[in-house]
Image (tube, rainbow, N blue to C red):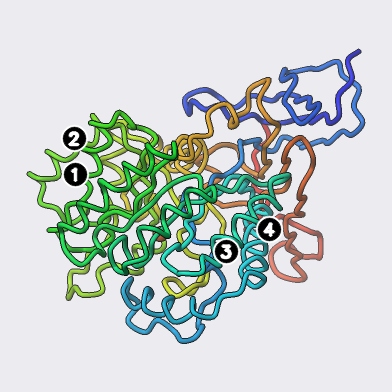
Amino acid sequence: MTSCDLLLRRCRLLSPAPSVAVEEVEIAIADGKLVAIAPRLDYTASQELDLQGRLVSPPFVESHIHLDSAMTVGEPRWNLSGTLFEGIEIWGERKRHLSAEEIRERAIATLRQQAAQGVLFVRSHVDVSEPSLTALHALLAVREQVQDWITLQLVAFPQDGFYGSPRNVELIEEALRLGTDAVGGIPHYEFTREDGVNSVHRIFELAQKYDRLIDIHCDETDDDQSRFLEVVAACALRSGLGDRVTASHTTAFGSYNNAYATKLLGLVGRSRLNFVANPLINLTLQGRADTYPKRRGLTRVKELWQHGLNVSLGYDCIQDPWYPLGTGNMLDVAHMALHACHMTGTSEIDACYDMVTWNGAKTLHLGDRYGLEVGKPANLIALDARDRFDALGRRPVVTHVISRGRLLVETTPPVTHWHSGPSGGDRPSPSAHENLRIPQ
Ligand code: FE2
């Protein structure tokens, strides 16, 4: 009999291919890795967990968040217009009073909240257009501090643009020298179209010089004349960087006329870009200048997915100047995407689940660090669901989070007690949020 550190019994293992039926297996973990997966394993273990037929999935991936501004809502004031641009103004006021300690505290509190809900991979943008780089230094330290339980990627993001202030180009390069994983930008916010185009070219030069990934806030506006995605796609194609490049938001794509959108779909398909949509936030921020009908302000998620492009989803903001709400629950993000993007067919719902798991891993370029195959790091979650559809339909509690081969978080689902009424007693019954699981 072989020994291992942790043996998981009665796991209903989710396959990367939605068409493959979920099967019940046992999973052996040793030295932080998945060492065996089979219907029956002959292992002894230091610790055993009976997952009672719960769905076992790779962890959720948060493809796009801003940890430096998380949990600052109302400071110093509320965003009354609800627009991206008032949010940038408010953050401009707030960031004059940042301290490394408060950023660290807010970031770790947010990461803990995410991890407790099954998120073990996070890409955070960090504003590097603030001259002291306080937020960057704080989040670089956080990345080290949390590495034993959650993977944090940082994107050097100039919130005020490359050319909004004379020092910004140097600050962005300094952020790359200090070790950010990716370089970002915000071409639609630059003063002129020429500045926007130049910023995209500069991003690609810096990515090649420092060998980093690219993730650009691109065309996050309802302006149908904002057309930087074509520049990003052309640069990705010509440079050969392809799937190392991500276009985030691209909400103007939802406003382009169909003739141009069709041409653009062909170009982005050749470029192999990743796309990140942030449905909770962009439904809220966009359309603010519209009368009725109001646009949804989302990129063409469904069409990009139909064209075989990699689309993942992000929360973007948790309780900050751009979005006052937010919990970090990625099932909420996917649930909103399937509504707002009209993805209610069965394969479309399955795809929305993949957008917060496997697709996110592709965006973050995780490679063999992600997935539930033998030999890979043992990162997985268990939830009370039968399959992808059921997980999105009921958004159940993530009961177990296993990170680096160790049980990191365990959550007990709520139980509802009826004290009168049709059940006629106080016998515990599953709550609406918990257990409607159908036995195999
Ligand atoms: Fe963002």
> 334 or 209: which is nearer to us?
209
Q: Nearer the viewer, mark 4 or mark 3?
A: 4
Q: Quadrant of ligand 1?
A: bottom left
Q: Which residue is mark 1?
A: 230
Residue at horizontal 47%, vertical 64%?
317
* Amino acid bearing label 3: Thr
Q: Is residue 430 left or right of residue 230?
A: right
Would you call the spot at circle 2 few (<14 residues within 10 Å), some (14-19), or many (20 or more)? some
State whether residue 25 is above or below residue 302: above
The numbered disc on residue 267 is 2
The numbered disc on residue 112 is 4
* Amino acid bearing label 2: Leu
Indicate which disc, 3 or 1, sits on the residue closer to the N terminus: 1
Q: Nearer the viewer, mark 3 or mark 1?
A: 1
CB of mark 4 near ligand 1 (< 8 Å): no
Q: Quadrant of residue 101?
A: bottom right
* Residue 326 visible in rendering: no
Where does residue 51 sit, x and y in percent of width and height?
77, 37
Mark 2 and 3 residues: CB-CB less than 8 Å, in contact? Answer: no
* Amino acid bearing label 1: Glu
Would you call the spot at circle 4 few (<14 residues within 10 Å), some (14-19), or many (20 or more)? some
CB of mark 3 near ligand 1 (< 8 Å): no
Q: Is residue 189 left or right of residue 167?
A: left
The image quadrant where one finds the N terminus is top right
